[in-house]
Image: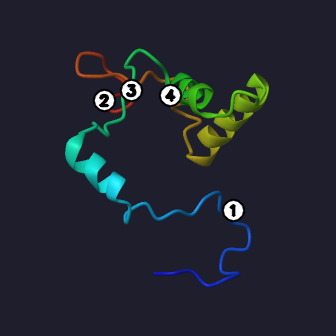
């Protein structure tokens, strides 16, 4: 459903693109298969996992302290303060899902 102008006054749009009509995209979809699963390191904590992702994805020119502030904002925004220092865990290691 399309949004009305002014419906979300504080929202920011960084990019709008329609790639579905491109023949090159259609060919790539049929030719290549890429796994879309997230990889979480079971020995890292929730904070370390988010920080690692932030360090990889945020712009290189952004100072490290700003990246850490953003990670802290994500932790707070998602309500993860209590589990911030809990390890992710995995099949053989108890963590956030099995604590």
17 left or right of 25? right
39 left or right of 65? left
Q: Residues within 10 Å of mark 4 (few under 14, many from 20)?
A: many
Q: Residues within 10 Å of mark 1 (few under 14, many from 20)?
A: few
Q: Quadrant of residue 80?
A: top right
Q: Quadrant of residue 7?
A: bottom right
Q: Comparing marks 3 and 2, which lies closer to the viewer?
A: 3
Q: CA distance from mark 3 to mark 1?
A: 29 Å
Who's the residue at 57% across and 63% down the image? Answer: 16
44 left or right of 25? right
Which residue was labeled with disc 2?
98
Which residue was labeled with disc 3?
40
- The location of residue 14, given as percent across then percent down, is 65, 57
Q: Comparing marks 1 and 2, which lies closer to the viewer?
A: 1
Q: CA distance from mark 4 to mark 2?
A: 14 Å
Which residue was labeled with disc 4?
46
Q: Comparing marks 3 and 4, which lies closer to the viewer?
A: 3
Which residue was labeled with disc 1?
12
Q: CA distance from mark 1 to mark 4?
A: 27 Å
Mark sitting earlier along the chain (1/4): 1
Mark sitting earlier along the chain (1/2): 1
Mark sitting earlier along the chain (3/1): 1
Mark sitting earlier along the chain (3/2): 3
List the single residue furthest toward the bottom: 4
Who's the residue at 21% across and 43% down the image? Answer: 31
């Amino acid at each position: 459903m399309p949004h009305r102008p002014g419906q979300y006054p504080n929202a920011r749009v960084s990019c709008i693109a329609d790639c579905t009509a491109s023949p090159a995209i259609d060919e790539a979809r049929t030719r290549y298969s890429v796994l879309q699963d997230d990889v979480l390191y079971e020995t890292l904590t929730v904070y370390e996992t988010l920080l690692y992702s932030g360090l990889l994805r945020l712009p290189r020119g952004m100072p490290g302290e700003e990246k850490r502030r953003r990670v802290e904002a994500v932790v707070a925004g998602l309500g993860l303060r209590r589990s911030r220092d809990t390890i992710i865990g995995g099949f053989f290691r108890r963590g956030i899902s099995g604590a």
